[in-house]
Image (cartoon, grey):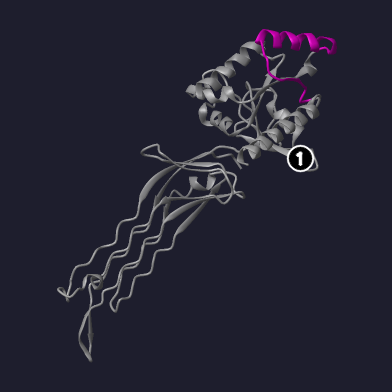
């Protein structure tokens, strides 16, 4: 199934039922008085995050969602039945925007998290509620209120601990295939990954993390070039970035220039991304003679003036992957411990 990460839907909450205008007429109660009941509340619409759903593809076929209207009130002080709420299941990681105002309504990042996106209309009031000592035959009623109607834009951002960024054909798909059970498309041409791919990296029996293979970026991605920000935004969810750099690009480009191009796009999209932990992963060392690997990689690091962590690997030959996975696991666990300490 193709990965669908955006969809637009229309939600309509139920209208509240009208209040009834009624007077009691019984044989032995000639002066029974007003007995119009209230209407029922309209049903509301909720979104709930569900782990069993991976895409927004269903919303490409069903665009309009309506909740039940509340029933109108009846005589003998009978209130109308409330409309049933409508619950819509969406993938974990879904962000909900108002299409007309661009307001962020909800960010569903945890399984079971619920958000009301359209409030049902309040019930109407029957004439029995207006009787008093000076108004014994009120004919006044209040109609039910209309339910909310909204156009919503749903955006799904993948939830992963580690995100792979880099130029097209830098070896990201090969790397995630070697480190996890994910099987993205692998080929010797750019943009083989058109949809984000998730994989679970098992470091040991009780230690694992989720890694995301994101489609390759190019210069101008922040303005929509290539696959654009449609997939660049997925980087925002990750806690750690692997910047995959091809040490010997087939197109003859300079790895240093490729690195700066990706860094610039991340900066344009969000300055916060540059503050996030990012590790330099020099990939495809199997293309170099064994005695030239160290000097070639050292030259790249020196020209980048890189001060962070550096890993020299080959996704195809599976060299250096165990150390990369273990270091990532240690870093993520340290983040979790720091978070728990802050909460305490």
Which of the pair 162/327 is nearer the observer?
327
Quadrant (top left/top right/bottom left/bottom right) for the N terminus: top right
Describe residue 206's horizontal placement relative to residue 68 as left or right. right
Describe residue 7's horizontal placement relative to residue 324 as left or right. left
- Count of residue discs: 1
Q: Residue furthest right?
A: 291
Describe residue 170's horizontal placement relative to residue 11 as left or right. right
- Res 75 quadrant in image: bottom left
* Residue marked by disc 1: 207
- Residue 127 is situated, as x and y percent measured from the top left of the image, at 23, 71
- Residue 296 is situated, as x and y percent measured from the top left of the image, at 76, 9
Find out whether residue 307 is within the magenta segment: yes
Describe residue 146's horizontal placement relative to residue 301 as left or right. left
Which of the pair 254/341 is nearer the observer?
341
Q: Give the residue at x 58% y 46%.
A: 110
Which of the pair 119/63 is nearer the observer?
119
Q: Give the residue at x 63% y 22%.
A: 168
Local crowd at mark 1 within 10 Å, few (<14), some, or many (≥20)? Answer: few
Q: Give the residue at x 37% y 47%.
A: 150
Find out whether residue 228 is within the magenta segment: no
Range covered by the magenta-colored residues: 289-316
Query: Is residue 131 visible in the rendered structure shown here?
Result: yes
- Residue 102 is situated, as x and y percent measured from the top left of the image, at 40, 36
153 above or below 313? below
- Residue 251 is situated, as x and y percent measured from the top left of the image, at 66, 13
Query: Is residue 225 visible in the rendered structure shown here?
Result: no
20 above or below 66? below
């Amino acid at each position: 199934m193709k990965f669908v990460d955006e969809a637009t839907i229309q939600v309509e909450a139920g209208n509240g039922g009208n209040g009834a205008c009624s007077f009691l007429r019984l044989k032995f109660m000639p002066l029974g008085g007003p007995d119009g009941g209230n209407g029922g509340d309209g049903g509301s619409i909720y979104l709930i995050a569900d782990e069993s759903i991976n895409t927004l593809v269903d919303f490409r076929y069903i665009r309009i969602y309506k909740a039940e209207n509340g029933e109108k009130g009846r005589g003998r002080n009978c209130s109308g039945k409330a409309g049933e709420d409508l619950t819509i299941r969406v993938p974990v990681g879904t962000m909900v925007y108002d299409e007309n105002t661009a307001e962020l309504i909800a960010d569903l990042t945890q399984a079971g998290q619920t958000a009301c996106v359209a409030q049902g209309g309040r019930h109407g009031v029957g004439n029995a509620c207006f009787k008093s000592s000076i108004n014994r035959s009120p004919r006044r009623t209040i109609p039910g209120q209309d339910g909310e109607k909204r156009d919503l834009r749903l955006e799904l951002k993948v939830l992963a601990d580690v995100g792979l960024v880099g130029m097209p054909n830098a070896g990201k798909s090969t790397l995630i295939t070697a480190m996890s059970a994910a099987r993205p498309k692998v080929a010797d041409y750019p943009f083989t990954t058109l949809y984000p791919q998730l994989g679970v990296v098992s470091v040991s029996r009780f230690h694992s993390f989720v890694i995301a293979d994101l489609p390759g970026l190019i210069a101008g991605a922040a303005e929509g070039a290539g696959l654009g920000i449609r997939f660049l935004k997925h980087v925002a969810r990750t806690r750690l970035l692997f910047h995959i750099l091809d040490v010997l690009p087939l197109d003859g480009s300079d790895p240093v220039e490729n690195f700066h191009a990706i860094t610039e796009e991340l900066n344009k999209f969000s300055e916060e991304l540059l503050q996030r932990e990012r590790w330099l992963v020099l990939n495809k060392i199997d293309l170099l003679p064994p005695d030239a690997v160290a000097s070639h990689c050292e030259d790249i690091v020196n020209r980048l003036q890189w001060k962070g962590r550096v890993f020299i690997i080959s996704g195809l030959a599976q060299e250096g992957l165990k150390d990369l996975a273990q270091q990532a696991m240690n870093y993520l666990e340290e983040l979790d411990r720091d978070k728990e300490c802050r909460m305490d």
